[in-house]
Amino acid sequence: MTGSSPLARNYSPLPVTIADGSGAWVTDGDGRRYLDFLAAYSAVNFGHGHPALIAAAQEQLQRITLTSRAFDNDRLLPFAEALTSLAGKQMMLPMNTGAEAVESGIKVARAWGYRMKGVAPDRAEIIVAAGNFHGRTTTIVGFSDDPQARDDFGPFAPGFRTVPYGDIDALRSAIGENTVAVLIEPIQGEAGVVIPPEGYLRAVRETCTRNDVLFIADEIQSGLGRTGATFECDNAGVVPDVYLLGKALGGGIVPVSAVVADEAVLGVLRPGEHGSTFGGNPLAASVGLAVVRLLETGEYQDRARHLGELLGDRLRSLVGRGVTAVRSRGLWAGADIDPALGTGREVAEDMLARGVLVKDTHGQTLRFAPPLVIGQDDLEWALDRFDQVLAARRNSVPSASHDGR
Ligand SMILES: *Cc1c(COP(=O)(O)O)cnc(C)c1O
């Protein structure tokens, strides 16, 4: 980069500048097309420019877009009714970004701890998992164990305790009288689509119930269709006390997030204790309602499940041929690239050159998360490109040990 971009350098984007998009495809300024295999970290689950979502946004743009919560708007209640019914909960708190939903969940859990559980003032503790990603605010990065996310951003808020992800015994022994909540991702997305052991989420549920502790599921990336179910917790057969939702809830159009829980939990909030200028605005609520309507059909969850089998099978067939491990659930996969072939970033750049947008995470992992509207042909086309990229790298690195020759 030549010195003087006016953009802060908190990202290092792949070298493509997107100008347009439709469905699973995007186009750069020169008219080159790329298949979007990231879907804005699952914020674009329904594809670019989904007609029903664009229509909801356009219709609302003509009417009114922002009222603040000082007044009610006629879109918010219908959105709240639809979302709570989709989630099987009684209440929702509308916010904007995912990090705000997480922060709101933390505040609600603490207030619940003091007011309902009787935890001594300022002693509430929330248990989180190693390898977590819950957003970028100072409180949230304070309980991250990723040095890139944390270093030089302290001092951090107290009140969090970290246990290894997927280890139920560690979780059980970390719970004390001041524990108010366990906050985990049902699948750790940023960590590389890390799936906990079978039975873990059920054991978390039981442990929380037995100890009068809230189970907060951060489904901001895993939820809303991605894993072949409305929530990844559905796949695991568990119901958390609190869902944190975001990303796809805004249909790829506006930031929309929410805390969804029963009244016994969210009912602790009193007027004036929490808020957001933009949270629950009519435009966001219209788009959010349209998103819930899409999910009510079950069609996108089914697509994710069926196409996900293809994605998982194809990726697993590459283990030993440039890929060292694959983790997948629904239309969501992490594939670890054999370091002998290069870094995740290098492979992502090769994929870009062949017309597929993927993003590396944590050095060697590529995350695959195409929009759920992707056609099977396009999915297979992209996986063919991945096959070719790995083959080219295997051939140019004769010392690579896993090519079977
Ligand atoms: C992306 C993400 C967040 C943060 O969402 P933002 O909208 O970027 O603030 C929180 N939790 C999980 C699991 C996420 O994937």
Image (spheres, rainbow, N blue to C red):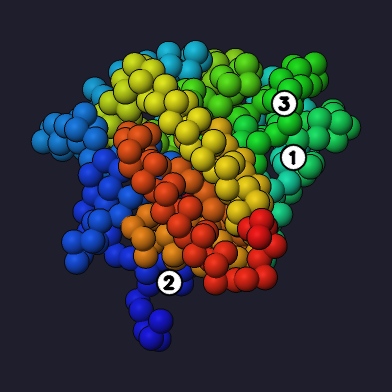
Which residue, given by chain and number where applicable, does mark 2 sit on? Answer: 8
The amino acid type found where label 1 is placed reads Tyr
The amino acid type found where label 2 is placed reads Ala
Residue occupying the point 54% across, 36% down: 313
Q: Are there few (<14), some (14-19), or many (20+) residues within 10 Å of tag 3?
A: few
Query: What's the distance in space between the residues labelled 3 and 2, CA to CA?
Result: 41 Å
Which residue, given by chain and number where applicable, does mark 3 sit on? Answer: 198
Asked if residue 140 lies left or right of residue 41, the reply is: right
Examine the image and state in which quarter residue 234 appears: top right
- Which numbered disc, 1 or 3, marks the residue that appears first in the sequence? 1
Query: What's the distance in space between the residues labelled 1 and 3, CA to CA?
Result: 13 Å
Circles 1, 3 touching at the beta carbon (< 8 Å): no
Measuring from the top left, give residue 229's x and y in whole percent: 49, 23
- Residue 187 visible in image: yes
* Viewer-nearest of discs 1 and 2: 1
Q: Residue furthest bottom?
A: 3
> Is 102 rendered above or below residue 352?
above
Query: What secondary structure is found at the residue carrying circle 3?
Result: loop
Quadrant containing the C terminus in the rendered view: bottom right
Q: Check mark 1 vs ligand 1: CB closer than 8 Å? yes or no.
A: no
> Is 397 rendered above or below residue 107?
below
Measuring from the top left, give residue 310's x and y in whole percent: 47, 33
Q: Residue furthest front?
A: 405
Measuring from the top left, give residue 159's x and y in whole percent: 74, 43
Q: Nearer the viewer, residue 390 or 308?
A: 390
Which residue, given by chain and number where applicable, does mark 1 sit on? Answer: 165
> Is 131 rendered above or below residue 166?
below
Quadrant containing the N terminus in the rendered view: bottom left
Q: Nearer the viewer, residue 340 or 182?
A: 340
* Viewer-nearest of discs 1 and 3: 3
